[in-house]
Image (cartoon, rainbow, N blue to C red):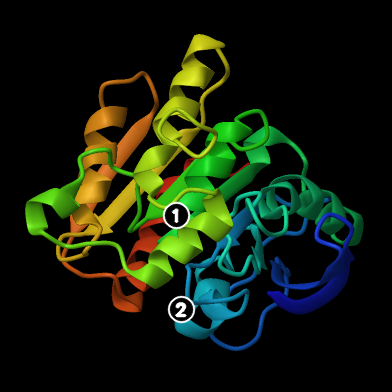
């Protein structure tokens, strides 16, 4: 594989940005098998979580080794603490990640623009971002991967537990979404159920969805609510749980399972 650290300018954000990119290479070093080269590679857009950046998948997993024999390119961009959305009081990260970045990367590298060759996946904040991007633009992505995340649950578990949103979390929600509590986002462009239903009503080609969460994850109830909703739709949707919490041990294991699930989609 070839690993590149790419610095470039985004017109949408108005600033310099970074991404790590993995490209297939037929010849490999000792202990690794290569993949056949082709004119345009299928590509996985791999998104980070809230506390991380574009380097994290390389630093915490062996993603380069996992895709070595798949003929699959991987683009890992940075999106700050944006929830991959056009922020209410900040940059337009959704437009950057979902629209501008693919155009930039396709200008640099031989990656495919075909829907059937494009997949989006992420963990935690990036899992929500992958779902939002894939459901907003189903014409551009054929498969979604979501780890340790889900829709914003409208069952207010805080009332059951007696917990309250922190002042910092309220400020973050206001900066990103323009609301104090993300439960207020029902039936908006940030609501995954709303986006999914819209695709069904408009008879769009629906992306496949692979959803996984650790059974000790603090977001597991959120993931289960999301799973229960999607299971009652005509999406090709799978939800799986396994031992683990909101940790890289879980994500390192499940990115491999996601790639195995993705294999039939790779030409």
Q: Which quadrant is home to the N terminus?
A: bottom right
Q: Residue 72 at x, y = what percent?
A: 64, 57
Name the disc covering residue 61, or none.
Answer: 2
Left or right: 231, with 81 as reference point: left
Left or right: 69, with 223 as reference point: right
Q: Residue 240 at x, y = what percent?
A: 24, 48
Q: Residues within 10 Å of mark 1 (few under 14, many from 20)?
A: many
Nearest to the observer: residue 97 or residue 206: 97
Q: Is residue 201 above or below residue 97?
A: above
Name the disc covering residue 127, or none.
Answer: 1
Which secondary structure, mark 1?
helix
User: Would residue 265 be seen by someone viewing this image from the given angle?
Assistant: no
Q: Nearer the viewer, mark 2 or mark 1?
A: 1
Q: Is residue 13 above or below residue 40?
A: below
Q: Residue 197 at x, y = what percent?
A: 44, 20
Q: Residue 253 at x, y = what percent?
A: 33, 69
User: Would residue 116 be seen by someone viewing this image from the given angle?
Assistant: yes
> Which one is earlier in the sequence, the residue at label 2 or at label 1?
2
Nearest to the observer: residue 89 or residue 193: 89
Q: Residues within 10 Å of mark 2 (few under 14, many from 20)?
A: some
Which residue is at a point 68% across and 55% down the rendered structure image? 93
Which residue is at a point 31% across and 29% down the rendered structure image? 230
Question: Image quadrant of residue 114?
Answer: top right
Nearest to the observer: residue 192 or residue 116: 192
Q: Which quadrant is home to the C terminus?
A: top right
Which residue is at a point 89% across and 61% down the rendered structure image? 108
């Amino acid at each position: 594989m070839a690993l590149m650290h790419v610095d470039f300018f985004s017109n949408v954000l108005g600033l310099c940005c970074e991404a790590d990119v993995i490209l297939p290479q037929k010849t490999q070093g000792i202990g690794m098998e290569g993949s056949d080269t082709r004119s345009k590679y299928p590509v996985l857009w791999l998104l980070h979580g809230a506390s991380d950046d574009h380097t994290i998948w390389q630093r915490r997993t062996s993603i380069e080794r996992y895709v070595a024999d798949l003929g699959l390119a991987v683009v890992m961009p940075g999106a700050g603490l944006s929830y991959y959305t056009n922020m209410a009081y900040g940059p337009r990260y959704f437009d950057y990640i979902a629209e501008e970045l693919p155009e930039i990367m396709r200008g640099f590298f031989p990656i495919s623009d075909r829907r059937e060759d494009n997949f989006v996946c992420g963990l935690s904040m990036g899992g929500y971002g992958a779902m939002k991007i894939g459901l907003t633009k189903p014409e551009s992505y054929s498969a979604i991967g979501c780890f340790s995340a889900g829709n914003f649950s409208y069952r207010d578990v805080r009332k059951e537990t007696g917990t309250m949103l922190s002042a910092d979390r309220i400020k973050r929600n206001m900066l990103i979404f323009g609301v104090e509590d993300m439960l207020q986002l029902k039936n908006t462009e940030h609501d995954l159920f709303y986006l999914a239903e819209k695709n069904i009503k408009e008879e769009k080609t629906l992306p496949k969805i692979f959803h996984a969460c650790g059974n000790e994850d603090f977001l597991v109830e959120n993931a289960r609510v999301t799973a229960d909703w999607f299971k009652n739709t005509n999406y090709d949707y799978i939800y799986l749980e396994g031992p683990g919490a909101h940790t890289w041990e879980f994500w390192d294991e499940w990115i491999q399972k996601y790639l195995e699930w993705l294999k039939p989609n790779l030409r």
